[in-house]
Image (spheres, helix red, strand yellow):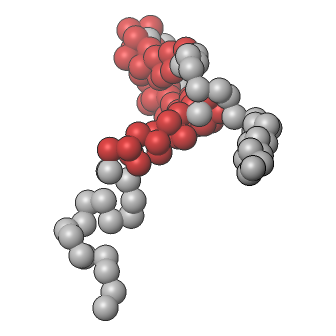
Amino acid sequence: MAAPPPAPPPDTSTERPAGPRSLAHRWLLVVPFVWQVGLVPVVNDVDLAPLHIPFPMVWQLLGIVVTSVVVAVVFRLDRRAGVEREEAEFLAATGQGGPSAGAPHGAGERR
């Protein structure tokens, strides 16, 4: 009589298990919007001119830095939450992934 197949090894990965996960960190993306649009009435009335640059312009320049930092933080938190893995699985399941996904049939083949 044949022996039963060996049991699979226990999962020791550090990835989060599939299931509900929190994407609440994406609310951080509201910060740049509020910075650039919501605070314009407040910033327009400031008479300060650092380095002889009008304050609203300095505010907008700082907003670019703040936006870059917020997007980088959200990107890292998304990666930690497993969003990349989920996206790769979706693309593989729907046949949309791969380097020649948008190329015509046979465009990436060598002969």
Q: Can residue 85 be seen? A: yes
Q: Can residue 53 be seen? A: no
Q: Give the percent coordinates (x, y) of residue 89.
A: 46, 42
Q: Give the percent coordinates (x, y) of residue 25.
A: 57, 19
Q: Give the percent coordinates (x, y) of residue 60.
A: 45, 29
Q: Nearer the viewer, residue 86 or 41?
A: 86
Q: Nearer the viewer, residue 98 or 63?
A: 98
Q: Quadrant of residue 48?
A: top right
Which residue of the protein is positioned furthest toward the bottom in this rendering?
111
Residue drawn 75% across the image and 50% down it: 1
Residue drawn 41% across the image and 48% down it: 92
Residue drawn 42% across the image and 19% down it: 33
- Label count reads 0
Q: Give the percent coordinates (x, y) of residue 68.
A: 54, 36
Question: Image height check: is 87 above or below 98?
Answer: above
Would residue 24 appear left or right of 56 to someone viewing this image? Answer: right
Question: Image height check: is 73 above or below 6?
Answer: above
Which residue of the protein is positioned furthest toward the left in this rendering?
104
Question: Image height check: is 64 above or below 28?
Answer: below
Q: Quadrant of residue 103?
A: bottom left
Question: Image height check: is 24 above or below 11?
Answer: above
Q: Quadrant of the C terminus?
A: bottom left
Which residue of the protein is positioned furthest toward the front in this rendering?
1
